[in-house]
């Protein structure tokens, strides 16, 4: 995203994700985009019938029903514990950025070094760097989440983080929405900082985008070109 993750703020990426030589193969998922799949996973976690809505933003009210209203947008009816008529909330994901990471010894230290050279002050915690090196984190998503009562004009916008992680069995992977921690925010900030630098200053990414100016290039194309360049650099690590 074009913003940092707010630290005060308190799916499947692929039906089957294949990893070969450390390379994140995004083109296996053909029925919907990775971003749409993550949004569907998030709505499944945050709007489960009978459970509190979105980490309890509607108080003790629980989800009664969920209805899609558009691309990555839903209306969620919640009912108070005392019963009575439901209140309808809106939930949408206006922007989702997915950043691949690469297992092995090279990528994590390169990422931190470049992020610090570009002005990032926080250090990526060692436990997170270890998860990246060992392949326990395969991608990081930054999600813009917008929600609020559907009958009001005001909406609250937050940013959340999700990790793509291998399942405990098999070759598939799954999205895991992360608690808001310094570790998750530091990794996400490093990826965002380096990604933006690559988009605006790396000749390999520019050639992939086919444009001297990133301003006219769709965000999905920008991120895909960064992914392709990093796969060539770190995919065999």
Image (cartoon, helix red, strand yellow):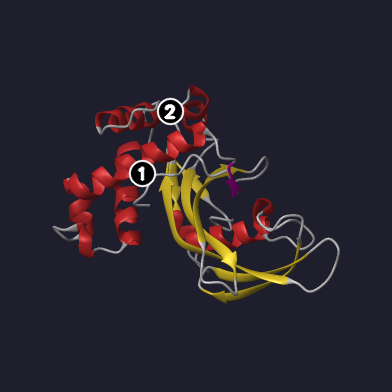
Q: Does the magenta stretch include residue 175?
A: yes
Q: Nearer the viewer, residue 208 or 176?
A: 176
The residue lying furthest to the top in this view is 126
Q: Does the magenta stretch include residue 118?
A: no
Q: Give x and y (percent) for residue 177.
A: 59, 47
Q: Residue 192, which numbered label? A: 1
First along the sequence among labels 2 and 1: 2
- Counting every numbered tag in the picture gives 2
Q: Residue at the spot x=30%, y=64% of the render?
A: 218
Q: In which quarter of the image is residue 58?
A: bottom right
Q: In which quarter of the image is residue 230?
A: top left
Give the crowd class for mark 2: few <14, some 14-19, many >=20 residues within 10 Å. many
Q: Can the viewer see residue 221 in this picture?
A: yes
Q: Nearer the viewer, residue 3 or 15?
A: 3
Q: Residue at the spot x=51%, y=66% of the render?
A: 154
Q: Give x and y (percent) for residue 166.
A: 59, 42
Where 221 falls versus 178 (above or below)?
below
Q: Residue at the spot x=50%, y=36% of the render?
A: 184
Q: What stretch is highlighted in magenta?
A: 173-178
Where 123 falls versus 62 (above or below)?
above
Secondary structure at numbered mark 1: helix
The residue identified by callout 2 is: 124
Q: Which of 59 and 99 is in front in this view?
A: 59
Left or right: residue 138 compared with residue 114: right
Q: In which quarter of the image is residue 54?
A: bottom right
Q: Is the magenta stretch mostly helix, strand or loop?
A: strand
Left or right: residue 5 compared with residue 205: right
Left or right: residue 222 compared with residue 138: left
Where does the C terminus fall, quadrant-wise? top left
């Amino acid at each position: 995203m074009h913003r940092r993750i707010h630290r005060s703020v308190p799916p499947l990426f692929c039906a089957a994700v294949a990893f070969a030589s450390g390379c994140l193969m995004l083109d296996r998922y053909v029925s919907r985009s990775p971003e749409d799949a993550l949004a569907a996973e998030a709505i499944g976690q945050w709007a489960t019938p009978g459970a509190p809505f979105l980490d309890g933003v509607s108080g003790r009210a629980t989800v009664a029903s969920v209805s899609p209203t558009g691309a990555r947008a839903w209306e969620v009816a919640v009912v108070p514990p005392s019963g009575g008529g439901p209140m309808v909330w809106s939930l949408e994901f206006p922007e989702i950025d997915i950043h691949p990471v690469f297992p092995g010894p090279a990528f994590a230290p390169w990422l931190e070094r470049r992020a610090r050279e570009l002005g990032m002050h926080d250090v990526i915690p060692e436990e997170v760097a270890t998860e990246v090196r060992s392949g326990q984190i395969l991608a990081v998503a930054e999600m813009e989440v917008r929600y609020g009562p559907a009958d009001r004009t005001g909406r609250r916008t937050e940013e959340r983080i999700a990790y793509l992680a291998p399942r405990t069995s098999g070759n598939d992977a799954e999205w895991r929405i992360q608690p808001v921690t310094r570790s998750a925010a530091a990794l996400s900030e490093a990826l965002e900082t380096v990604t933006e630098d690559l988009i605006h200053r790396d000749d390999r990414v520019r050639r992939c985008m086919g444009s001297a100016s990133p301003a006219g290039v769709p965000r999905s194309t920008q991120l895909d070109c960064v992914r392709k360049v990093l796969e060539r650099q770190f995919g065999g690590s």
